[in-house]
Amino acid sequence: MEADRLNSPSTSVITFEVLGHQLQFSQDPNSKHLGTTVWDSSMVFAKFLEKNCRKGRFCPSKLKGRRVIELGAGCGVAGFGMALLGCDVVSTDQIEVVSLLRRNIERNTSRIMQMNSNSDSFGSIRVAELDWGNEDHIKAVAPPFDYIIGTDVVYAEHLLGPLLKTIIALSGPKTTIMLGHEIRCTSVHEQMLQTWKKFFEVKIVPRAKMDSKYQHPSIQLFIMGLKTPAVTAEKPDNAVSAENLDKKTQGIDQQVNEVKTRKTDREEGQNCGNGTGVDDLDGEVIKEDCLQVTRLPDGKLSDWEARRYGSMAARLLRDIKIT
Ligand SMILES: C[S@@+](CC[C@H](N)C(=O)[O-])C[C@H]1O[C@@H](n2cnc3c(N)ncnc32)[C@H](O)[C@@H]1O
């Protein structure tokens, strides 16, 4: 799909321990599609749920039966985390990814069902094709949802408009939108943030609320609600006729473009792949190499540290041109 991958699918299965379960996610190292690998922000998202599920809005008693849709689910890690906490999840992606996604969901669901004592709070999870902006796909999943989630779904400017339209079409007045994002390119990040702020009340999860290991200065979690409930899908049958989707999302492309053209001088001329650093939300430059390394007793890096170094290396290599 994309020529310049930013992570490296070197293994065909990863094991991830979260919410008391050893989950296994298959990847496809031979595929060029970005959805066939587990991305780090999905792990940060799931581990954030684990850390915050004892009390408050993410405890299983509050989440039981909540309808969740995951957009651009890839291998399905973040949505599976929500299902483990009792939500009824629809995990979606483009058709090319759906079969791998389905295999991952089925494999982990059956593992959990076999562990009777530990599966009490499990909700449900199913897979559906959803191409952003496709009215038939949106209608088929029956919006509105309580939660719309996505991790690492904004990696290029052209995706912002279709993603935003889809989020709005799937939302009701009380929908919460939770996104995980790894900052790789300042201009995409700035445009995304300004666009979100235009349409949503945006809260950025402080790093203290994230798992102490599964976090990184360049990975952010956003919790958002729509600013203008009038544009949302209040009634399911009002949600997604072609005409309604058009009405609800009218002007979004224009507004996304407005944000684009208002880029600051600071951003102009910046290269998405410069690999030297990224801006955090206060405009401070975060050093990409500020990963705290804790060696395991045998002197090896933990899986997470190895992933983060892999990500850094991929970013640096992207800028090397072999002539
Ligand atoms: C970088 S991957 C992230 C995958 C997964 N969320 C994760 O964190 O591991 C981006 C995902 O967005 C999906 N995606 C990109 N454009 C899309 C579109 N127009 N409609 C639906 N999904 C899309 C890709 O198929 C891919 O699964």
Image (cartoon, helix red, strand yellow):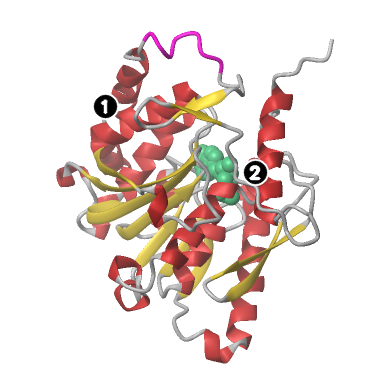
Query: Do the residues under discs 1 and 2 have CB atoms within 8 angstroms?
Result: no
Q: Which residues are magenta?
A: 265-271
**Residue drawn 36% across and 66% down?**
67
**Number of other residues with Cα within 10 Å of mark 2, as a class: few under 14, some 14 to 19, many 20 or more:** some
Query: Quadrant location of ligand 1?
Result: top right
x and y, in percent, of residue 292 in the image: 60, 45
Residue 264, image x, y percentages: 35, 13
In reply to whether residue 196 is colored magenta, the answer given is: no
Q: Residue at x 57, y 58 (%)?
A: 76
Q: Would you place residue 157 above or below residue 200 in this image?
A: above
Residue type at mark 2 is: Arg
Q: Which residue in the protein does label 2 denote?
A: 308
* Relative to 271, 321 lies left or right: right
Amino acid at dot 1: Gly
Which quadrant: the C terminus? top right
User: Which class describes the residues within 10 Å of circle 1: few (<14), some (14-19), or many (20+)?
Assistant: few
Query: What x and y, as percent, mark residue 4?
Result: 69, 28
**Pointer 1: what residue?**
251
Q: Quadrant of residue 213?
A: bottom right
Residue drawn at x 80%, y 45% is 30
Q: Nearer the viewer, residue 204 or 297?
A: 297
Q: Position of residue 238 (x, y in %)?
A: 23, 53
User: Does 62 sit above or below residue 38?
Assistant: below
Residue at 73% in and 41% down: 8
What SS does tag 1 mark?
A: loop
Of label 1 and label 2, which has the lower sequence position? Answer: 1
Q: Is residue 163 visible?
A: yes
